[in-house]
Amino acid sequence: MSFHKSDSRTPLAPAEYTKIPTVVTVYDSEKKNASRNNASISQPKFIRSDMADVPVQQAAGSTLPLVLTRKKGGDDGEDGTYNPFEHRKVEHPTSDLETFVHLLKGSLGSGILAMPMAFSNAGLWFGLVATLLVGTLCTYCVHILVKCAHILCRRRKIPMMGFADVAEQAFLDGPPGLNRWSRFIRFMVNTFLVIDLLGCCCIYLVFVATNVQQVVNQYTANEISVRLWIVIVSTPLIFMCLVRNLKFLTPFSMIANILMFVGIVITFVYMFSDLPAPAERDGIVSATHWPIFFGTVIFALEGIGVVMSLENDMKNPNHFIGCPSVLNFGMGLVIGLYTLVGFFGYLKYGPETEASITLNLPLEDKLAQSVKLMIAIAIFFTFTLQFYVPVSILWKGIENKISAARQNMCEYGLRVALVLLCCGIAVALPNLGPFISLIGAVCLSTLGMIVPSVIELAVYYEDPGYGRFKWRLWKNSGLIIFGIVGFITGTYVSITEFQAEFKDGHDEM
């Protein structure tokens, strides 16, 4: 796979095309009315340079970067017959099988290690049903996003769009009251992507430090606190994150995936040995714990950040959604695997289940210690890849405001500052469980459920409408409410747990 980085300073078109073309309603002298279907739309024959969000899209917990190569758009088609798939100029299009593999890479990551902890906050049987339900909702919201992207591509005669592009264009095509918020929704999507990915980097630091601490403490008399280990781990990452070319990070990605695969396989061996009877575990726990479950599952399962880049690079994009489809097969496998790990992990360790299943492995066992170190090293290397995405988004927003002579220094300064920010947050909040739930509740419930539902309401506002009895309105309203409830409750419970931790730490002092 080759990696491409677009140069945002290279003009792609005349100045008159630098803004999104708006729909201009014209008067039809024969029908005596006006509508969007009769709109005169002046469309550019390229993708705007500011519509290329970032060269890489990556999901929470991913161990490989998924590259979105931005290409110049195709030509306009005839009215009503424009097929965006025919106008895509993809240098190396991916087959259905390749897209399936990339989808698995983007959705399967460190989040799988937290699934047993999620089940401990739901119960064995309730967690089983709820994980399947939440996974199905996440997959359905991905369908909504991609379907709306296809509609907007045809309507606006644009070959391909990213996540933020779809949100912005949907607001421009939606109710008049949303038009003025089009740039804001684009900013919000990118902001939540940055928060999500930087939050994942903070979680990685806590994860690596906690696992290394467990192993090292077995061989030293003086225990080092997890906060100090976070600082120690962050120091080499400052220098590694100065690497700007993604291809130099590819070997670390390969090492990370090999170590992660071997570590998870050995973890499964421990997890499936000497399983107790299901009757020994709670089938359902108190509802006060459910928000932690929701946030953790959303964090682990949500792959909304990778879908548009994958669909844009497909040889047959119409195979991505539908039934059967690449998305259904891929997410079905992911949901099944995550449910399996969560169910049997909680069945094995019960109330003692840790935030990461690796922390439950026996401390005195040499093989278990090697697993902790292997997965810690894999997550350590993954940090640099995960870090690449928010840096790309943030740097793209400020690059043109800085003189060419100062750009290199400023970009390096941004990278160092972000690593130090992640380190500071991780040191302040070294509790892995509520941290994972907080990121899932705040960012991924917004990007994975609320935003796609709002996008569909905007896209279907006038054409083709909300359907019989306005079923699309009621359906999306339900998804939005579900996402908001998960956002609020998950955030509240996570913050409450952090406050309790701070209080306990203060009392001990």
Image (tube, helix red, strand yellow):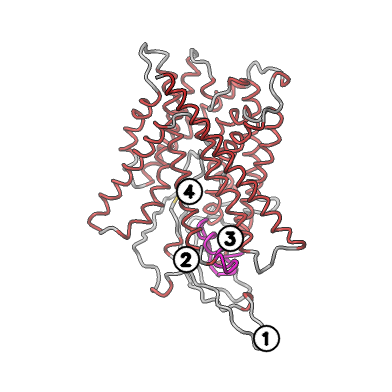
Sequence order check: which comes first, mark 2 or mark 4?
Answer: 2
Sequence order check: which comes first, mark 3 or mark 2?
Answer: 2
In the image, what residue occupies the spot 69% across and 58% down? 473
Mark 4 crowdedness (10 Å alpha carbons): few <14, some 14-19, many ≥20: many
Which of the two marks, 3 or 1, is nearer to us in this view?
A: 1
Q: Which residue is mark 3?
A: 149
Instruction: State the SS at label 4.
Output: helix
Q: Which residue is mark 1?
A: 32
The amino acid marked with disc number 2 is Ile
CA distance for labels 2 and 4 = 21 Å
Q: Position of residue 337 (x, y in %)?
A: 63, 34
CA distance for labels 3 and 4 = 18 Å
CA distance for labels 2 and 1 = 34 Å
Magenta span of residues = 151-178
Instruction: State the SS at label 3.
Output: helix
Using the image as rendered, state which of residue 342 and residue 459 is in the foreground: 459
Q: Which residue is mark 4?
A: 193
- The furthest residue to the left: 405
Sequence order check: which comes first, mark 3 or mark 1?
Answer: 1
Mark 3 crowdedness (10 Å alpha carbons): few <14, some 14-19, many ≥20: many
Q: Position of residue 244 (x, y in %)?
A: 34, 47
User: From the viewer's perspective, is residue 34 above or below residue 327?
Assistant: below
Mark identifier at residue 47: 2
Image mark count: 4
- The furthest residue to the bottom: 29
Q: Main secondary structure of the magenta part?
A: helix
